Image: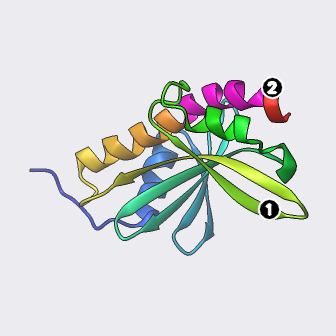
Amino acid sequence: MTATTTVNMDRIGALLAEKGYEVSEQGNNILRIRETGSGVAVQAALEGGILFLSLNCVTVPAASVTPELMHKMLAADNGISTSYFQLYDSGDGKASITLNNFCKLQDMGKEDEDDILSCLHFLLVDVLEARRLIGGMVM
């Protein structure tokens, strides 16, 4: 039997740092994770045993978030297989389009470690397709 610990951001941060990610604390239960090869940064938040990962694809004038763009982002066949989009009001007439993923954690055993790494990996892969999907429409 492997030893397990409670789910907390310190353990999550240590796991990601061990795997080569640059990790910094952004506040209570919030981490900034940077993939060092690409420089892509992800925000991680832990709430109630669920690790939420969010990656800002682009911040654009809110008027550029058209129904056509939203249809592309929500289409089942859009090429984004494991993550989902969200829109946030960024103020000053701008909107941020984020790509998000999450995983439920139990006890920080081996399965949870695999889930965290998989969730982050899927998000980093999906962002490439997401930027291709929305890039020509908002950038």
Q: Residue furthest right?
A: 92
Mark 1 residue type = Ser
How many C-alpha atoms fall within 10 Å of the one at disc 1: few (<14), some, or many (≥20)? some
Q: In the picture provided, is 24 more to the left or to the right than 104?
A: right
Say which of 47 and 26 sits in front.
Answer: 47
The residue under the point 64% across, 27% down is: 128
**Closer to us: 49 or 98:** 98
Q: At 70% from the left edge and 47% from the top edge, which residue is drawn?
A: 97
- Residue 35 in view (yes/no): yes
Q: Quadrant of the C terminus?
A: top right
Please tell me whether the stretch drawn in magenta is mainly helix, strand or loop.
Answer: helix
Disc 2 on helix, strand or loop? Answer: helix
User: What residue appears at the point 86 percent right and 49 percent down from the top-left corner?
Assistant: 63
- Mark 2 is surrounded, within 10 Å at the Cα level, by few (under 14), some (14 to 19) or many (20 or more) other residues, namely few
| Dot placed on the residue nearer the N-terminal end, 1 or 2 | 1
| Residue 49 spot, x, y in % from top left | 34, 65
Between the C-alphas of marks 1 and 2, the distance is: 21 Å
State the mark number for residue 90: 1
Asked if marks 1 and 2 touch (Cβ < 8 Å), the reply is no
Q: Position of residue 135 (x, y in %)?
A: 77, 29
Kindly tell me whether residue 39 is visible in this rendering.
no
Residue found farthest to the left: 1
Q: Which residues are magenta?
A: 124-135
**Magenta stretch holds residue 81:** no
Q: What kind of residue is marked 2?
A: Gly
What residue sits right under mark 2 in the picture?
A: 136
Describe residue 31's horizontal placement relative to residue 87 as left or right. left
Front residue of 37/76: it is: 76
Residue that protrudes farthest toward the front in the picture: 67
The x and y percentages for residue 122 are 47, 34
Q: Secondary structure at mark 1?
A: strand
